[in-house]
Amino acid sequence: MRKSNPPSRVVPDRARAGESSRGRPDVIVEFLFDRGCFLISVNNIGNGPALKVAVQFDKKITSPDGKKELTALPLFKNIEFLGPNREIVAFVDASSSYFRRKQPTKISTQVTYRDINGEMYELSIKHDLEIYRELPYPNV
């Protein structure tokens, strides 16, 4: 559920596509595939700092042992400050284990954050991890 302070207005990030991104944050969430491992990246690809970054997932993803819900970690609830061109990467699971445990492959994320002036941004990103299922990788 999105909360907005009265002086701020929420503008969908895509509505700003024509605006210059110089000096403003631009936060994305990606699932990375690296040598057979899945990772989640929260990345400020913009030129300004992002404040109060939050990520909501539409599906639950659990740790490799199944005991912890990774998508509920504090990391995704509130990153107070994410500098320009800074990234936080978290291990999810080996892809073979992830698929064997029947974890979700189609996942949507909702990213919200503010700039230093208090303006709020939001972005929805859809991911399909199924594309990695048949990819070969070295066993290291």
Image (tube, rainbow, N blue to C red):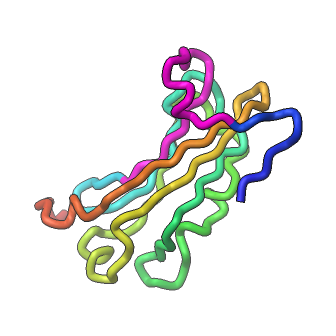
Quick check: 8 above or below 133? Answer: above
Q: Is residue 114 left or right of residue 4?
A: left
Q: Is residue 9 left or right of residue 71?
A: right
- Of residues 117 and 97, which is closer to you in this image? 117
Where residue 2 appears, as percent x and y from the top left, is 72, 53
Q: Quadrant of residue 97?
A: bottom left
Q: Quadrant of the C terminus?
A: bottom left
Q: In this view, does 68 lie to the left or right of 92?
A: right
Does 17 appear in magenta? Answer: yes
- Of residues 3 and 101, which is closer to you in this image? 3
Where residue 117 appears, as percent x and y from the top left, is 78, 25
Quick check: 140 above or below 79? Answer: below
Task: Kindly identify the residue that appears in the image at 22 percent across and 59 percent down.
Answer: 131
Q: How many marks?
A: 0
Q: Quadrant of the N terminus?
A: bottom right
The single residue placed furthest to the front in the displayed view is: 15
Task: Kindly identify the residue that appears in the image at 76 percent across and 35 percent down.
Answer: 9
Where residue 136 appears, as percent x and y from the top left, is 11, 61
Quick check: 110 above or below 74? Answer: above
- Of residues 14 and 23, which is closer to you in this image? 14
The single residue placed furthest to the right in the displayed view is: 6
Task: Kindly identify the residue that appears in the image at 52 percent across and 84 percent down.
Answer: 67
Task: Kindly identify the residue that appears in the image at 30 percent across and 61 percent down.
Answer: 129
Where residue 8 appears, as percent x and y from the top left, is 81, 34
The boundaries of the magenta stretch are 11-31
Quick check: 24 above or below 133? Answer: above
Does 59 appear in magenta? Answer: no
Q: In which quarter of the image is residue 15?
A: top right
